[in-house]
Image: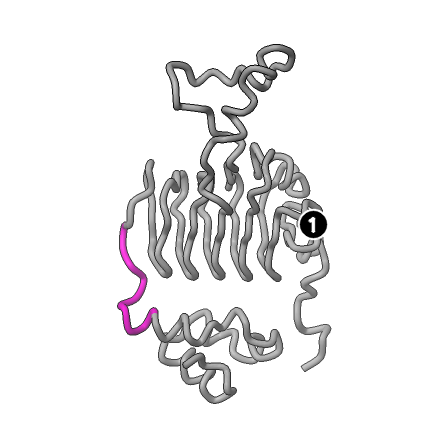
Amino acid sequence: MTAATIPDPSVRHPLAGHDRVVLLRPLVADPRIQVGEYTYFDDPDGATRFEERNVLYAYGPERLVIGKYCALATGTRFLMAGAAHPTVGVSTFPFSMFGGTWTDRTLDIVTGLPTRGDTVVGNDVWFGYGATVLPGVRIGDGAIIAAGAVVAGDVEPYTVVGGNPARPIRRRFDDADIDRLLRAAWWDWPVELVTEHVRAIMSGTPADIEAIAAANGLLAS
């Protein structure tokens, strides 16, 4: 197997002639955004503007962490903690952002707001068209976020969620199979091994993936 037969994770546009598809790891420059290899974003109108148009209100130190092999459809957006308005008093109006005396008298209120922390997405997560993720959410490996979903709370691994606010629709596998997949963690395999077994990864069973990981000494205890 030669390197030429495996997609290059350092190439911004992995599909020749299709600039709407970008690999995010070689694209993003903001140190607060961390993306794993082969995670891609699809947008026919400005895919390379992901940081500007799809990671919104990133004014604070909170990070957006996305794992490997995730698929982000057009319109997938992450709202960061800077989107929050104060709700401790009568008004939610953001006086502090306008400068001058308003800022002098209220900035401590804004800087003292609690935060839910980083937004963390696992590996092999599929985001449908127009999905929105709110600040501080954690999404587990293998989850599916339905088109138009607004994810306001954490999502368990291998769970399909949808709606506003997003609710669990179904689990993709039972507890035993999810445990097999999380222990096998195929997304952490060397890419050559992924390539060798890509058909099994796409169409096999959790037991198949567990067996491959075990045979290569990659199954977590």
Q: Residues within 10 Å of mark 1 (few under 14, many from 20)?
A: some
Residue 132 visible in the snapshot: no
Instruction: From the viewer's perspective, tell me whether residue 62 is left or right of residue 5.
Output: left
Counting the numbered discs, the total is 1
**Magenta part of the protein: which range?**
169-178
Q: Can you say which quadrant of the picture contains the C terminus?
A: bottom left
118 to 175, vertically: above or below: above
Position of residue 105 measured from the top left corner of the image (x, y, whole percent): 56, 15
Position of residue 194 measured from the top left corner of the image (x, y, whole percent): 55, 75
Question: To which quarter of the image does residue 209 belong?
Answer: bottom left
Position of residue 132 measured from the top left corner of the image (x, y, whole percent): 45, 39
Q: Which residue is mark 1?
A: 27
Give whichever of 99, 169 is nearer the camera: 99
- The residue at 49%/44% (across/down) is 117
- The residue at 28%/73% (across/down) is 176
Q: Can you say which quadrant of the picture contains the N terminus?
A: bottom right
- The residue at 51%/47% (across/down) is 118
3 to 96, vertically: above or below: below
175 to 114, vertically: above or below: below
- The residue at 27%/69% (across/down) is 175
Position of residue 13 measured from the top left corner of the image (x, y, whole percent): 69, 53
Of all residues, the one furthest to the top in this rendering is 101
Residue 36 visible in the snapshot: yes
Question: To which quarter of the image does residue 166 belong?
Answer: top left
The three-letter code of the residue at mark 1 reads Leu
Element marked by disc 1 = loop
Question: To which quarter of the image does residue 205 belong?
Answer: bottom left
Give whichever of 205, 109 is nearer the camera: 109
151 to 196, vertically: above or below: above
Instruction: From the viewer's perspective, tell me whether residue 130 is left or right of residue 196.
Output: left
